[in-house]
């Protein structure tokens, strides 16, 4: 959901530090504060899908989501403590217990306009339960990918769906 202009600003952040979810949401809201919201569509995957949902609700914008986390407070509670980054095991960070409360506090109770969401949900997701995603985004147009995995390794169909969805979305609210 960050435009190219701000990608350079984001790179300057120290992502190896203990950044909490509320800081990420505040940063995202600050980055888009002066942007024209018309035409803005949020895109996120997994925990990023959760964050995109939080931002979509706060900003009233549509979102395309790939295997979005539905209840990260519950799912991440077992990961409190020092962790390694998935993309580089040499990068370490500390996931604090208070982050769970922050995730709970920012979780939207209900989606105000399910039709603004376009989730892509893989039934073979080994990390998140696809049925839980489908229930959370009930009433939303969606692509249900039979099989696949959390990373959507066979990304061709989901990518085509995203492109179609973005062309069809009414981005005025």
Image: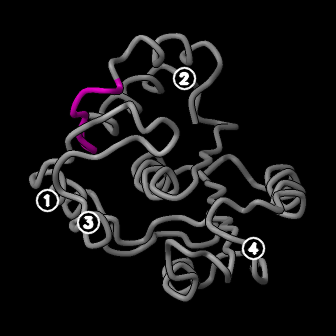
- The 10 Å Cα crowd at callout 3, few under 14, some 14 to 19, many 20 or more, is some
Mark found first going from the N terminus, 4 or 3 = 3
Quadrant of res 138: bottom right
- Which numbered disc covers residue 35? 2
Describe the element under mark 2 as helix, strand or loop.
loop
- The 10 Å Cα crowd at callout 4, few under 14, some 14 to 19, many 20 or more, is some
**Figure disc tally:** 4
- Which numbered disc covers residue 73? 3
Mark found first going from the N terminus, 4 or 1 = 1
Mark found first going from the N terminus, 1 or 3 = 3
Give the residue drawn at x 46%, y 19%: 10
* Residue ID for mark 4: 148
- The 10 Å Cα crowd at callout 1, few under 14, some 14 to 19, many 20 or more, is some
Mark found first going from the N terminus, 2 or 1 = 2
Determine the CA span between mark 2 and mark 3: 30 Å
- The 10 Å Cα crowd at callout 2, few under 14, some 14 to 19, many 20 or more, is few
Quadrant of res 90: top left
* Residue ID for mark 1: 101
Q: Position of residue 155 (x, y in %)?
A: 82, 57
Whether residue 16 is situated above or below residue 41 in the rendered picture: above
Task: Identify the magenta region.
Answer: 15-22
Q: Position of residue 24 (x, y in %)?
A: 33, 36
Is the residue under label 4 in contact with that under label 2 (CB below 8 Å)?
A: no
Is the residue under label 3 in contact with that under label 4 (CB below 8 Å)?
A: no
Whether residue 35 is situated above or below residue 61 in the rendered picture: above
Determine the CA span between mark 1 and mark 3: 7 Å
Describe the element under mark 1 as helix, strand or loop.
helix
């Amino acid at each position: 959901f960050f435009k190219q202009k701000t990608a350079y600003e984001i790179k300057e952040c120290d992502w190896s530090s203990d950044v909490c979810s509320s800081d990420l949401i505040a940063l995202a809201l600050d980055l888009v504060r002066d942007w024209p919201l018309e035409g803005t569509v949020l895109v996120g995957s997994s925990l990023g899908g959760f964050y995109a949902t939080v931002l979509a609700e706060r900003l009233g914008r549509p979102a395309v989501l790939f295997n979005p986390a539905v209840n990260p407070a519950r799912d991440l509670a077992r990961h409190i403590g020092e962790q390694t980054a998935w993309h580089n095991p040499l990068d370490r960070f500390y996931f604090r217990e208070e982050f769970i409360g922050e995730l709970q506090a920012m979780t939207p109770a209900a989606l105000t306009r399910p039709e603004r969401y376009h989730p892509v949900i893989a039934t073979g997701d080994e990390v998140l339960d696809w049925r839980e995603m489908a229930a959370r985004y009930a009433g939303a147009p969606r692509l249900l990918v039979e099989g696949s995995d959390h990373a959507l390794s066979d990304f061709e169909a989901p990518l085509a769906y995203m492109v179609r969805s973005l062309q069809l979305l009414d981005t005025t609210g």
